[in-house]
Amino acid sequence: MKWNPEILSKFVAPGISDFTSATIPDLTDEFPQASYWLVNHFLNSVFRTGFKDRWRQVVIAYLRRAQNAFVAYHNSSEITANYLKGNEPQNPKIGAYFGVVSSWENFALQASMAMDLIRWLNQGQGVFVKNDGTKEQRLYQMANLVKHTASAVSSGQCKESDTLPLWLSNDGLHCFDHALSYAEASEILRELAIGAEKFQDPQATHEKLREEDSM
C-alpha cells in the first residue's frame, strides 16, 4: 500500500514521505569517557578534591544532563538508521517513526536543561542570547516547543501543517519555525561533552581556573 503524502504529513509528520536518509556524526570515539563522567566525578571528588556546595550540586546536575544528552543523541542516531533501513517512504513504519521522534525530543530536552545549567556555572552568561538564531538557541526553542505544544497551537505559532513540534528530514531536525542540521546537533553535543570532561575532575578544574586568574 502507498499512502498519499498529504495524508501522511497531516496525520504523522510533515515531509515524512521525503525522509529517506540521514548522515549523523558519531562522537563516541571522540569522548570515550562519556559513559563514566558521573562515576569519574564521584571518584575524583572522594579521592582528590570536590566542588563546594551549590557548585557541587549544579555540576552533578550538569554532568547528568550532558551524559543523558550524549546517550540520547547516539540512541537517536541508531534508531533513525534502523527506521530508514528498508523503509518505504510512502508506506512508512509509523510506530517506529514516532519512536525516533521521541528519542530526538529526549535529546533536545536533555541538552536544553544542560544549557540552563551552563548559565548558572558561567555566572549568568548563557550559551546564546534570546532569539539570536544560533544553533544553541534553535535547539533550545525546539525543546520548549516539545514541552509547550499546546501553548504554541493556541498562540498560532504552530501552523495547521505542523503536525508535530519536532520532526525529521534528510537534513536534520525541524520544528514550527526553524531547523537544526544533524551536524549542528553534534556540534552542540560536542560542546556539552567538553564541559563534562572538564567538570568530571574538580581538582583539574580548580587548577585551570587558578592558571587563568594568574594570566
Image (spheres, grey):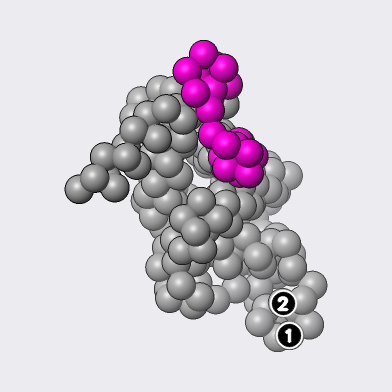
Contact, CB < 8 Å: mark 2 with mark 1? Answer: yes
SS state under label 2 = helix
Q: Which residues are magenta?
A: 41-62
Relative to 92, is 42 above or below?
above
* Location of residue 67 with respect to 190 vertically, above or below: above
Q: Residue 172, percent across and down?
A: 46, 56
Graded by Cα atoms within 10 Å as few (under 14), some (14 to 19) or many (20 or more), the crowding at tag 1 reads: few
40 lies left or right of 1: left
Res 155 label: 1
* Residue closest to the eye, 90 or 24: 24
Tell me which residue sits at (56%, 62%) in the image: 140
At horizontal 46% and vertical 55% (from top left) the residue drawn is 122
Can residue 120 be seen?
A: yes
Magenta-colored stretch includes residue 44: yes
Identity of the amino acid at label 1? Answer: Ser
Expressed as whole percent of the image width and height from the top left, the position of residue 200 reads 48, 29
Q: Residue at x 37, y 29 (%)?
A: 204
Residue 26, image x, y percentages: 39, 35
Viewed as shown, does residue 186 lie left or right of 155? left
Q: Nearer the viewer, residue 2 or 134?
A: 134
Residue extending furthest toward the bottom: 156
Tell me which secondary structure the magenta stretch mostly adopts. Answer: helix
What is the x, y in percent for residue 64?
61, 36
- Mark identifier at residue 152: 2
Query: Which amino acid lies under the numbered mark 2 shown in the image of this protein?
Result: Ala
| Nearest to the observer: residue 136 or residue 160 | 136
